[in-house]
Image (cartoon, rainbow, N blue to C red):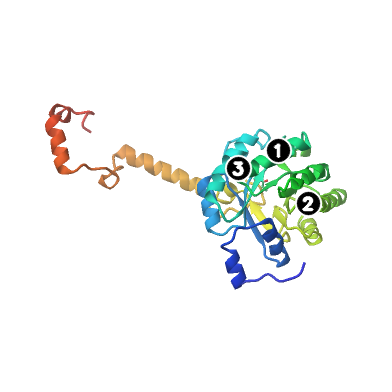
Amino acid sequence: MEGTLSTKPSPRQNQEQLQKVTTLAFRRKKERAERLCMLTAYDFPTALALDRVGIDAILVGDSLGMVVLGLENTLPVTMDDMIHHCRAVARGAHRALLIGDMPFMSYQVSLEEAVRNAGRFLQQGGMDAVKLEGGRARLDCVRAITGAGIPVMGHLGLTPQSVHLLGGFRSQAKNAGAAKDLLEDAIALEQAGCFALVLESIPTGLAGIISRRLLIPTIGIGAGPECDGQVLVTHDLLGLFDRFTPRFVKRYADLHAEMERAFTSFMTDVRAGSFPTADHSVEMEQAEWQSFLAKNRGEAESPVRPAA
Ligand code: KIV
């Protein structure tokens, strides 16, 4: 890969900050050695915030099942769940590349179903592209979906939809044979038409070799700094999901603690009668109020609740 990492944005880069991010822009960024930033979102306000700060891509991940819906893993997530959340995200983000994660069993059964479901992400969900998990077993699927004009992001390494096959959420490709397999999967996915590849929880050196070998960008999560970009699950980064945090997550905030603090303060205020105050209340014009009291004197005099 040619080029060095730039520090000062050029006029062209400033212009790009205002333009819709496309799959082509993804490729160009890799050529210029600019690192790509992707985060997940499942709702309107998060999408709005991510778009405002200039994130390159937003993934509506099926991690939705774990961090939003409280499921044990991603397997029960349905197409309807995904479309519902994609629509909310698409309302909030207009600049970032929007990628919808194809849920378990939405692309494995037949190519026809895979194409139809991928199409729903664009037609009904407002997404620009889809992501799906798996290597050489998924090549026909990638060809069929891209053949319908829908960009596909691949996903190799720890593929959570195969959690039972993998024997748990474990790092992958940790021996020479598995590493070679994964490299071959990556090359095959690029040849089949993927525009980018997520590499999850694999050794840093292997992710580096794949990133240099491919023309399409690699987006790492637990795959080290040599990938062309990085992705995290936003709820992990914000400290909103404290049930389980993978080792590769860096927490940038502790919003779960902040949420508990705010909820507790609300309850304390309500119980003490210090919320709401006049600042949070609605008043009537004095003349209207006096007229109301005059016509409803009995009501006004009967105490609704015992005095404190
Ligand atoms: O579902 C998801 O959020 C993902 C990311 C971890 C890449 O697949």
- Alpha carbon distance from label 3 to label 1: 13 Å
For the point 22% across and 28% down, which residue is it? 304
Q: Is residue 165 visible?
A: yes
Q: Residues within 10 Å of mark 1 (few under 14, many from 20)?
A: some
Residue on which the image places disc 3: 125
Q: Is residue 218 above or below residue 122?
A: below
- CB within 8 Å, label 2 to label 1: no
Tell me which numbered mark, 3 or 1, is placed earlier along the sequence. 1
Q: Pinpoint residue 261: horizontal percent, then vertical percent.
A: 44, 45
Q: Secondary structure at mark 3?
A: loop
Q: Pinpoint residue 206: horizontal percent, then vertical percent.
A: 80, 56
Tell me which numbered mark, 2 or 1, is placed earlier along the sequence. 1
For the point 26% across and 42% down, which residue is it? 282
Q: Residues within 10 Å of mark 2 (few under 14, many from 20)?
A: many
Camera-side residue: 293 or 302? 293
The answer to whether residue 302 is left or right of residue 61 is: left
The quarter holding residue 158 reads top right
| Quarter of the C terminus within the rendering | top left
Q: Secondary structure at mark 2?
A: loop
Mark 1: amino acid: Arg
Camera-side residue: 43 or 233? 43
The answer to whether residue 298 is left or right of residue 125 is: left
| Comparing labels 2 and 1, the label whose residue is closer to the camera | 1
Tell me which numbered mark, 2 or 3, is placed earlier along the sequence. 3
Mark 3: amino acid: Gly
Residue on which the image places disc 1: 116
Camera-side residue: 33 or 116? 116
Q: Pinpoint residue 112: horizontal percent, then vertical percent.
A: 76, 36
Residue on which the image places disc 2: 193
The quarter holding residue 223 reads bottom right
Q: Residues within 10 Å of mark 3 (few under 14, many from 20)?
A: many
